[in-house]
Amino acid sequence: MPLAGKGMLLTSMDIDSADEPDFNRWYDREHLEERVAIDGFLEARRYVAQRGSPKYLCLYSTETFEVLDSPAYRAALNNPTEWSRTTMARFKNMIRAVARITLSRGNGRGAALGVVRLRPSVQSADSLRATLHEKLDPATADGIISMHLIESDPALSRPLGADPASSSPGAGDWFILIDGTGVDAVSGAIGARFSDAPAFGPASVISTGVYKLMWDLARCDIPA
């Protein structure tokens, strides 16, 4: 099926190698389950980079976009555990995108994920969506399971703790997500469909990356 829900939180970061064991333990033993247990959250997936940066990436799907600005989610953000507070302070090169899922084609999820980060101009949004609707067709690429577009909300996607008045050019970026059966299939799809920057008009391709699935957690996996 296409991506679950209508909202998505994308987070990505680097971590010093000395802190990686505790960082991964925190994600695997506390953080993912804590987030998926929030009302309106549906699932989470953890990835590690095979090509590109930051090294770690996580996707959280929510029933609606509004869940990502709900009292329940805000309460979790404002009351982190001591382990969370310590670990998050170690993040480097943090990306945080609070986004709407605006396009989702295909059925299922893959073992590898391609990520293309775009920065559209306001004037190009409608034409860019039309262009991407044609490009995000998994049926014409071997090894590609599904393809998606998420559009970040500029106000909600600022780094946590950032000054609300500060400028954050990347807060409104869009992300193309490509689910595939393996790294080679995803890399091929990125190269074939998203390497031609002029095809995106006023939008800029900020970065691309290929990630391998570490594990996933659905709401139904958590004991009642």
Image: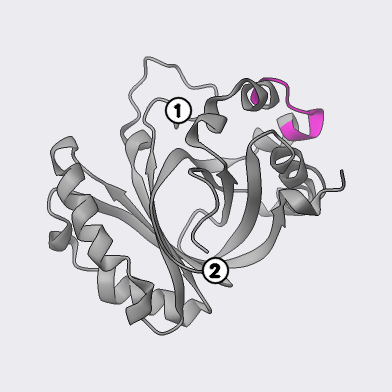
Q: Is 42 in front, or is 81?
A: 42
Residue 168 x, y percent position in the rendering: 35, 29
Q: Is 2 in front, or is 22?
A: 2
Q: Main secondary structure of the magenta part?
A: helix
Q: Please report the residue visible at 35 percent of the width from the left and 75 percent of the height from the top.
A: 189
Residue 79 x, y percent position in the rendering: 73, 21
Using the numbered discs, state the Cα–Cα distance from disc 1 to disc 2 in whole angstroms.
Answer: 28 Å
- Among numbered discs 1 and 2, the one appearing first in the sequence: 2
Does the magenta segment cover residue 3?
no
Does the magenta segment cover residue 79?
yes
Left or right, 186 with reference to 136: right
State the residue position of label 2: 108
Q: Please report the residue visible at 64 percent of the width from the left and 56 percent of the height from the top.
A: 46
Q: Please report the residue visible at 23 percent of the width from the left and 44 percent of the height from the top.
A: 120
Magenta-colored span: 77-84
Indicate which label's residue lies in the foreground, 1 or 2: 2
Q: Please report the residue visible at 64 percent of the width from the left and 51 percent of the height from the top.
A: 44
Instruction: Point out which mark residue 156 bears.
Output: 1
Crowd around label 2: few <14 · some 14–19 · many ≥20 (10 Å):
some
- Amino acid on which the number 1 mark rests in the picture: Leu
